[in-house]
Image (cartoon, grey):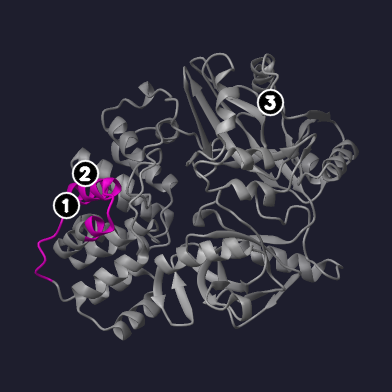
Amino acid sequence: MLRFAQTCDAVAATTKKTDKVRLVSSLLQTLPVEDAARAATFLTGRPFPRWDERVLGIGGRLLWRLIGELSEKSGEAMSGAYRKHGDLGDMAEELLAERVDAPGVSLAEATSVFGELASARGQNEKTELVRRLLARARPPEVKYIVKVMTGDLRIGLRESLVEEAIAKAYERPLASVRRANMLLGDIGETLQCAFRNELETVRFRLFHPIDFMLATPVETAAEVFQNAAEPMVVEEKYDGIRAQAHKSGNGVKIFSRTLDEVIEFPELRDPLLALPGEFIVDGEILAWHGAQALPFTQLQKRLGRRNPDLWLMEEIPVKFVLFDLLYYDGELLLDTPFVERRRRLKHLLAPAQTKQLRLAPERMCETREALEESFRAALAAGHEGIVAKAPDSLYTPGRRGRFWFKLKEPFATLDVVVTAVEYGHGKRHGVLSDYTFAVRQGDRLLNIGKAYSGLTDAEIHEFTDYFVKHTLQDQGFRRIVEPKIVLEVAFNNMQRSNRHESGFALRFPRILRIRADKTPEQIDTLERVRELYAKQITLPRAATGATAADRGAG
């Protein structure tokens, strides 16, 4: 584990991609393959493989308390160290720097404890497991154990660079490594296949979610045809939850864009089971009543409910609108042109005359005018906009390219992560209702504003309980919290500001919705903020510097 920590420090110290790949590759080469596989998983910032749905159930507040106990430092010293680093792992290393006689832990030991934490039920049991692990670990090891536990290494290392390091370490084609990792959803197993030269034998497994293909934002219909010379297949852009359904035999699982299992919509199970064969379909789950989609705020009422009652399902029925077929009866279709995947999907759905499943309507648009007409029609129908897809486009998981484009309604929004919360006033006295939020710049989170409107009282009470349990630093009236909750915030415009680390401030920000489908790694960046600000000062608009693509990606 110490060698892993030292390599992570070296990776964090360089901005050069080639140096990062070289350092990780060298580490993997020097470790036994089992440890190399564990290291590869940890280097993605996860305790478990991507397909593995287990969670540790350890919050920042517990880690803060245990670090304080082990270091025997005062609350003031801990707060000062946290303010200095802005990271719980880095804080722990500094506070525990004198514990040079700790025996140290191995990668295998850390992996074993993570597994025990995921299966432990009581908080006391979890606390003791973490306490024993941190007590044995040397300061650099503690730092990265904590970082993996909190899900963010902050060393400037993306999973794609770990793939490159595996390819370099074992002299395998990078394309083969990436395809194997996509099919397996397990970077550690991918490494072992590369070591054994078995990448080409990797086969797809059902119920292991595939990364979703993404659409590139555009601002006008004309921009679509600047990037694509052929007619485009146009679909409505829905305001729901992107979902991927796997079916085989009597088994059905639905996964969100974050590759977590979706269990809130049990009424979709039987319609999917009724479809023939085994398959993976891609689509959007919407709140739907009669012949019209309902706003996302209605669908949001069903999120987080593991066992929705019949009354709620009748009040807010859902529909799964399908637009792609990724796998069918043993054949992976990612390299099949979109129009052929669409044809097969239509054939699959032909017998399914149910109110819960629907094939997404499509229209072939050959001109900018036709695409603009489709866009206006989609807005009039209450949808977010349109997605235009090249007929011959392949399905490229997890990537944006010049094959799918999204044109959305004009509205200025950003996807941000909550970094601090404050107690409210008046009727919100006693609840954490004022949220400070940030955008991302590389591995750093930079605050850009604060909002206190847009959530219901019930949501605020629920989040108060959550943030109290996930507090990193209690400042009394204000709390620094784990950066986990992603929000979509709207604003009128933005201005330069010395108040926030980002250098910008949003004017009249308000919370549009909770983005449970996005991780903190997927929030908007400072580069995006600068783009919006540049448009705002160059375009003649009174209230907003936004365009059709400015709303956060759905």
Q: Which mark is residue 120?
A: none
Residue farthest toward the bottom in the current orientation of the protein:
76
Residue 418 lies, in percent from the top left, at 53, 66
Residue extent of the magenta highlight? 100-127
Residue 347 percent coordinates (x, y): 67, 15
- Please tell me which residue is depicted at 50% across the width and 72% down the height of the picture: 420
Does residue 113 show up magenta in the picture?
Answer: yes
Q: Residue at x 63, y 72 (%)?
A: 452
Kindly report the distance in space between the C-alpha atoms of the residues bearing marks 1 and 3: 49 Å
Task: Inspect the image, locate mark 1, and give the three-letter code of the amino acid beneath it.
Answer: Ser
- The total number of labels drawn is 3
Instruction: State the CA–CA distance, disc 2 to disc 3.
Output: 42 Å
Which corner quadrant of the image does residue 292 belong to?
A: top right
Q: Is residue 79 covered in magenta?
A: no
- Of mark 2 and mark 3, the one earlier in the sequence is 2
| Circle 1 Cα neighbour tier, 10 Å, few/some/many (<14 / 14–19 / ≥20) | some
**Dot 3 amino acid type:** Asp
SS label for mark 2 = helix
Q: Residue 61's x, y, as percent? A: 35, 68
| Whole-percent x, y for residue 101 in the image | 9, 69
Q: Is label 3 in a helix, a strand or a loop? A: loop
Specify the label residue 35 is tagged with.
2
> Which residue is label 1 attached to?
106
Note whether 251 is above or below 494 in the view shown: above
Q: Earlier in the sequence, mark 1 or mark 2?
A: 2
Q: Quadrant of the N terminus?
A: bottom left
Any mark on residue 392, and which? 3
Question: Considering only vertical position in the picture, is 251 above or below 451?
Answer: above
Q: Are there few (<14), some (14-19), or many (20+) residues within 10 Å of tag 3? A: some
- Residue at the limit of the structure toward the front, as seen here: 311
Q: Are marks 1 and 2 in contact (CB under 8 Å)?
A: yes
